[in-house]
Amino acid sequence: MASSTRPPSESSAEHLLGQRGVQRIPTDKLELFQLRNFLSADHCARLIDLIDEKRRPSTIADDNGDAYFRTSETCDLSPDEPAVRQLEDLLDTLSGIDPAHGEPVQGQRYDVGQEFKPHTDYFTPNGPDWDKFCSVAGQRSWTFMVYLNDVDAGGGTRFKTIRKTVQPETGKLLCWNNRRPDGSPNPNTLHHGMKVRKGLKYVITKWYREKEWG
Ligand SMILES: O=C(O)CCC(=O)C(=O)O
Ligand SMILES: [Fe+2]
């Protein structure tokens, strides 16, 4: 689809591969891309400082009762902060998605032993949290995440169905389409923020929605 006809809520393989340095992870099971050095080390350091100021224990939607499912600490990052505004602008340009479809950026920090167990970022259609989280903005369409530091050991992001683990690296971006070409949720996007073994891990996550964020 030509970018001029792409809906405002969508990115696409064609658009992303037109951006300098973007690489597609070879698989036909999902649309998954990485971009090294998306953010400078200095920009990452400023975002890490903001996460350290604001972090609190993470929560999850579609809670499955496992208290150890997502053990990291999380916070929303306000675009009133210049480092966040700059990040949002870079993400909107890279993704090609209308900013109105973006959730607020989230920051996450994992200490040794913390993880985010295998999950998908889309909401289960008509699941327990569907109405609460999706009635206005609809499904999560694309996920963009950025590693803000090199982790001493562990902390990779594992996509089990394609047997691919992406290693954290300062400023490296990872993004994927949460749906199949027909628009249905893609279970092959299952991913695991693996346990940090040594050091700390900081990431930011930006989710886009099919409809405008309320
Ligand atoms: O930390 C990671 O590697 C994955 C994070 C993640 O999956 C999420 O925040 O939804
Ligand atoms: Fe995730």
Image (spheres, rainbow, N blue to C red):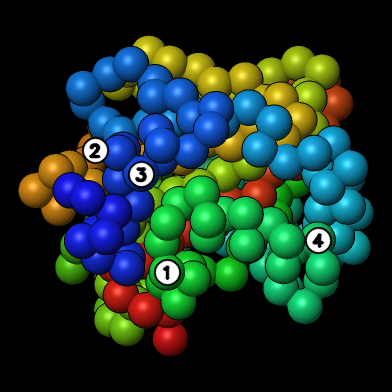
Disc 2/disc 3 C-alpha distance (Å): 23 Å
**Mark 3: few/some/many CA within 10 Å (<14, 14-19, 20+):** some
**Residue holding disc 3:** 15
Secondary structure of the residue carrying tag 4 is helix
Q: Quadrant of residue 52?
A: bottom right
Examine the rendered structure and indicate whether residue 212 appears above or below residue 164.
Answer: below
* Disc 3 residue type (three-letter): His
Q: Position of residue 130 (x, y in %)?
A: 28, 71
**Residue 92 shown left or right of residue 5 in the figure:** right
Q: Secondary structure at mark 3?
A: helix
Q: Nearer the viewer, residue 157 or 37?
A: 37
Task: Identify residue for label 4.
Answer: 83
Q: Establish if 40 lies above or below 2.
A: above
Residue 124 % position (x, y): 25, 58
Give the number of the disc on residue 98.
1
Q: Secondary structure at mark 1?
A: loop
Q: Is residue 37 above or below residue 27?
A: below
